[in-house]
Image (spheres, rainbow, N blue to C red):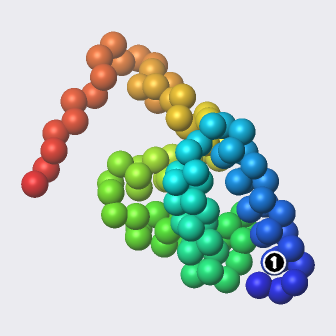
Amino acid sequence: MNPTQQHRYHVLHKQHLTNLTLQGKRPATIDAYSRAVRRISAHFDRSLDILSPAQVGLVISMTQQARYQVFFLVLYSMGLRLSEALHLTIHDIDRHSRHPPQITKRL
């Protein structure tokens, strides 16, 4: 990262840590989030707010649990804020459905 990008990263990272603290997250959770953001930023050598679509796809594909892959894909593709994504329901996705979809686990 060049100095301008590095400064922007530090400002955004500090804001992120402040928001997590204000949300009442535990110190261990804040530390885990912080390490994850630093690792991804270091891997791509840029701030997370300017990843290309291919880089976002790489992050999603490198995520090990399918439910998190789906979550990140929905978050990115719909341009949702974290709080908006966390409050999604089945009826937000399929308003005509009276029953939640049946999920079968494949081995």
Q: Nearer the viewer, residue 60 or 31?
A: 31
Q: From this viewpoint, which residue is outermost toward the bottom?
A: 2
Q: Position of residue 6 (x, y in %)?
A: 81, 77
- Residue drawn at x 41%, y 17% is 96
Query: Taking 102 as reference, is 99 above or below it?
Result: above
Quadrant in which the C terminus appears: bottom left
- Residue drawn at x 66%, y 46% is 20
Left or right of 91: which side holds 31?
right
Quadrant in which the N terminus appears: bottom right
Find residue 103 and report its image quarter: top left
Q: From this viewpoint, which residue is outermost toward the left?
A: 107
Secondary structure at badge 1 equals: helix
Residue 94 visible in this rendered orientation of the protein: no
Residue 36 visible in this rendered orientation of the protein: yes
Find residue 19 and report its image quarter: top right
- Residue drawn at x 48%, y 72% is 58
Q: Residues within 10 Å of mark 1 (few under 14, many from 20)?
A: some
Q: Position of residue 48 (x, y in %)?
A: 68, 67
Find residue 98 and report its image quarter: top left
Q: Nearer the viewer, residue 98 or 103?
A: 103
Query: Taking 23 as reference, is 32 above or below it?
Result: below
Q: Nearer the viewer, residue 16 or 85?
A: 16
Query: Taking 46 as reference, is 96 above or below it?
Result: above
Query: Taking 18 as reference, is 44 above or below it?
Result: below
Q: From this viewpoint, which residue is outermost toward the right?
A: 4
Q: Position of residue 3 (x, y in %)?
A: 87, 84
- Label 1 amino acid? Gln
Q: Position of residue 77 (x, y in %)?
A: 57, 51
Q: Circle 1 is placed at which residue position?
A: 6
